[in-house]
Image (cartoon, rainbow, N blue to C red):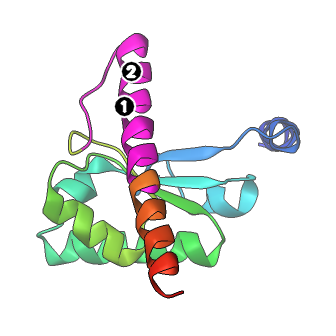
Amino acid sequence: MDRERDRLEQLSRIGVLVSVDDFGTGYSSINYLKRFPIDILKIDQSFVQSLNSEVDASIVRAIVSLAHSLRLKVVAEGVETQEQLMFLRSLGCDQYQGFQFSPPLPAAQFVDLVREWQRDEDEQSAAESTRTVSKLFATR
């Protein structure tokens, strides 16, 4: 374990972010959070898929709270519905993955998708800045 921790620390020092995937299942132990230089917890999709269960919703709430108290980012995997997204946002989840946004894509299509999102964001920002400028001029 010491050798693995040393390697992860070396990677961390050069800017590589370390994630624990599928947190809450299998081998993803809470002990990893204190032994390794972790940056991101990825909540397993099995919890996200059953957020309508009070138990799973409570587990997700606890994971987000634990991660944030340790100053870690939280990624929710398997977000497929607007309801799941809204619940996760209400908890302060930092990032989301899943079909709510896009199915898995080949690299070229992913680049096109990101460019489209960026273009939409740029257009929205430009429209908002125009409205702000016009409000400023209207008050003079």
Q: Residue drawn 54% across and 86% down? A: 140
Mark 1 is surrounded, within 10 Å at the Cα level, by few (under 14), some (14 to 19) or many (20 or more) other residues, namely: few
Q: Is residue 122 magenta?
A: yes
Q: Residue furthest bottom?
A: 139
Q: Is residue 129 magenta?
A: no
x then y, percent, for residue 40? 58, 53
The three-letter amino acid code for the residue at tag 1 is Glu
Mark 2 is surrounded, within 10 Å at the Cα level, by few (under 14), some (14 to 19) or many (20 or more) other residues, namely: few
Extent of the magenta region: 101-125
The three-letter amino acid code for the residue at tag 2 is Asp
x then y, percent, for residue 108? 41, 11
Q: Residue drawn 36% across and 42% down? A: 120
**Dot 2 lies on which element?**
helix
Q: Is residue 119 above or below residue 25?
A: above
Q: Can you identify the residue that label 2 sits on?
A: 112
Res. 102 in view: yes
